[in-house]
Amino acid sequence: MLVPRVAEGVHLITHAYVNCYLIEDDDGVTLVDAGLPSMWPMLRELLETLNRTPRDIRAIVLTHGHFDHVGFALRAHREWGTPVLVHREDARLAAHPYRYRPQRSRFLYPFTHPGSLPKLGRMAAAGALGVRGIAETRPLGPGSALPVPGSPTVIHTPGHTDGHCILHLPERDALLTGDALVTLDPYTGHSGAQIVASAATKSTRQALASLDAIAATGARILLPGHGDPWVRGSERAVAEAIRIGAH
Ligand SMILES: [Zn+2]
Ligand SMILES: [Zn+2]
């Protein structure tokens, strides 16, 4: 297996339009988001490729509590004892990852955005409809140098969900943006830097306001929850997301 390195010491696991990331340093690894259930063997394979064991995963940090980011968190917690961190305002969502109320019904979306159909179908085939939530989480608070490998700075970016957080790695010039800014929206099938469609976003107004925090990092590499890495800097990504706007 080729090591899918997307920034210094950051590796991508991607499947069915869903991304999660492993951040490495000398103390071990941090997993950012837990994807979909079918990505479990891909995580194991990547750990082996990196000469790591599951014990090296010091923590799973969830950018937010949606099902496509919580996928195998409970399994890792039960089988390996990995602590799982999520912002307090998303703890309930992580425990019940389907119980959320977006602005618009996501079930209407395939009809207005036919491009989304194959993507949602692949997510379903990858276990998107069978995710078990995790209630045993620890609170993730905003601040610098979270004491996990990579020492990310946690920034609260509400909008997509109330407790959504992004993780900045200033020394690696990288920002893990979760669903605060994506480069592919699986709900519409559209690519480009953008906020996620109102079908899956609690408040698009607030999500657009939170883009300021992304721009302010000045990070060159943006690593989203859906879509390819963006390497043209946070300001240009945010300008594009504002131009595309709410949808
Ligand atoms: Zn989401
Ligand atoms: Zn997502």
Image: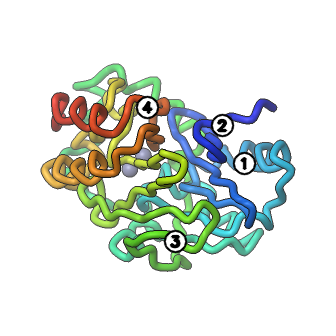
Disc with the residue nearer the chain's start (4 vs 1): 1
Horizontal relation, residue 102 to residue 23: left or right: left
Disc with the residue nearer the chain's start (3 vs 1): 1
Residue 112's spot in the image, x, y percent? 22, 25
Disc with the residue nearer the chain's start (3 vs 2): 2
Tell me the kind of residue under disc 4: Trp
Tell me the kind of residue under disc 1: Leu
Residue 143's spot in the image, x, y percent? 39, 72
Q: Is residue 30 above or below residue 236?
A: below
Label 3 beta carbon within 8 A of ligand 1: no
| Circle 1 crowding by C-alpha within 10 Å: few under 14, some 14–19, many from 20 | many
- Could you give the CA–CA distance between mark 3 and mark 1, rounded to whole angstroms? 22 Å
Please identify the quarter of the rendering in which residue 224 is found. Answer: top left
Residue located beneath label 4 in the image: 230
Badge 1 element: helix
Who is closer to the viewer here, 167 or 86? 167
- Could you give the CA–CA distance between mark 2 and mark 1, rounded to whole angstroms? 14 Å
Specify the label residue 146 is tagged with.
3
- Residue drawn at the location 86% of the way across and 50% of the way down: 51
Horizontal relation, residue 207 to residue 139: left or right: left
Residue 246's spot in the image, x, y percent? 16, 38
